[in-house]
Amino acid sequence: MEAEKLDQIWEADRLDRRQDARFLYNFIVGEVAKRKRLNRRSSYSLNIDAEWGGGKSFFLERFGKQAKERGHVVAYVNAWQDDHAGDPYIAIMAAIDQAFAPYVKKDSAIETAWKSVKSNGGRIALKAGAGAVRSLVKKHFDLTTDDILGEDLEPSLASEAMEELIDKSIKTGAAEIEKLFDRTLQAMIDQFQKADKAIQSFREKLAAAVETLDKSGKKAPLFVLIDELDRCRPSYAVQLLERIKHLFEVDGVAFIFATNSQQLQYSIAGAYGPGFDGFMYVKRFFDRTYLFDTPSDQRRIEELCRNIDPAKVIVPGGNLSEFVASGCRHFRLDLRATEHVIDIIDVTVSAWPHRIKLDLALLFPLCTTFYKTGRAEWNAVDATALDDWVIGSVVSDGFRGEIDRRINLKFTFETSRNIFSNLGNILEHLQNLNNRDQNDRYIDNVFSQELNGPVQRDQPSVQTELTRLVKNAGMLLTLEK
């Protein structure tokens, strides 16, 4: 692949995931080729493990683009987006069908092979569960109602059938029980054998279609990328893993999952009850798990701040992520606290309704105070906590000597808080400044936005609305802590 194209794909990579992609691509391609050489099933299933916000979705999207550029067919499944469906089989098939579509149009051999897969797949009894038992008991017990089982329930075929047998036996008498059981059991065995044959045939057809891709010039393996599995309903996540394990793990197919493995394990264990080993259950679906390294605090903050609209804020020093990082260090926020404070800032900025920009020097201490105390009030902010918080530095200029570009956050916060109750106070304060240092220039920059044109002197600054917005933002985010 051209280096320029690769640079474009990974242009926004702030967590250095590009080097992870390079290693994992070479590893998976090599592992699939090795298995094929050893006459083993040449599929592979890799789980990428990282916390939420660790760049998993970004990685999968870029990895997919990179693989396409290198000549692979790539299917993408957003499991969380699709978990409204009853069965993940359809979502997986749709994703692979979409990946095949461009090549089906160009190559008759691929078209024939893929049509065979879809035709065979359509006959798989993936919805056997409740529907199959319902039809069986209707046939053998002459039942006519449609409410034997709820549509969403999927207990075992045997338990369902036995429930109907017990109910029917009361009416038919004990002499008929054995005969009814034999007929129902045989019907279930026949149904199972048909489904088993269909599944085996489907796997063979899918492997043949992938091989046809390989012969037509597309590289092996076919990549299927599955994102957001840990955010799905536990039952859907389990179904998806089971479907892939039993239907789609065929020669020439590589699956890459992106999950918060701990969250996925907890979710599945919670669904199955106390004592269930979610770790061992999830582990059996993956050949290996690759653990993303934890990004540095600075990179993490940069990534979190990407969501904040820079056009709606005024930032001391001009660099949003550097200012936020400085504040997090000054207030000694750990990673969890940092994420919550930035989240409150993000929500507040999104909800800011004015064309006048909000002041981050006012907003950051307010959000931090709310996180620590639950109070979004100006008098709740401990001014002493702002001691020694300074942004910028003294720089040397060949013509003007040393230039002090430092902004004292305690000074700007307290000054702003003292004057923003009405625009008259602000106007008088700015007019009485004799020596405008960097602090004064920053305050002027914040409030002069509201002093252009006619001024209602008794009107408060729009910056005073930040307390209400921060409180609302905190209420919105409370359940996510």
Image (tube, rainbow, N blue to C red):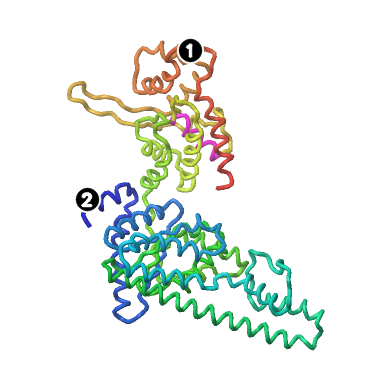
Vertical order, 270 against 356 (above or below) = below
Q: Is residue 231 left or right of 326 when viewed as pictured?
A: right
Q: Amino acid at mark 1?
A: Val
Closer to the observer: label 2 or label 1? Answer: 2
Q: Which residue is mark 1?
A: 455
Tell me the quarter of the picture where residue 94 sits.
bottom left
Stretch of the chain drawn in magenta: 360-372
Our reading of the magenta stretch's main secondary structure is helix
Q: Amino acid at mark 2?
A: Glu
Which residue is rendered at x = 68% and y = 77% of the image?
Answer: 139
**Which x, y percent locates residue 312?**
43, 31
Element assignment for label 2 = helix
Q: Is residue 162 left or right of 95 when viewed as pictured?
A: right
Q: Extreme left residue here?
A: 398
Along the line of sight, which residue is nearer the eye, 341 or 66? Answer: 66
Pointers 2 and 1 in contact (CB under 8 A)? no
Q: Is residue 164 left or right of 387 when viewed as pictured?
A: right
* In magenta stretch: residue 452: no
Q: Is residue 62 left or right of 186 when viewed as pictured?
A: left
Q: Which residue is mark 2?
A: 4
**Which x, y percent locates residue 27?**
30, 67
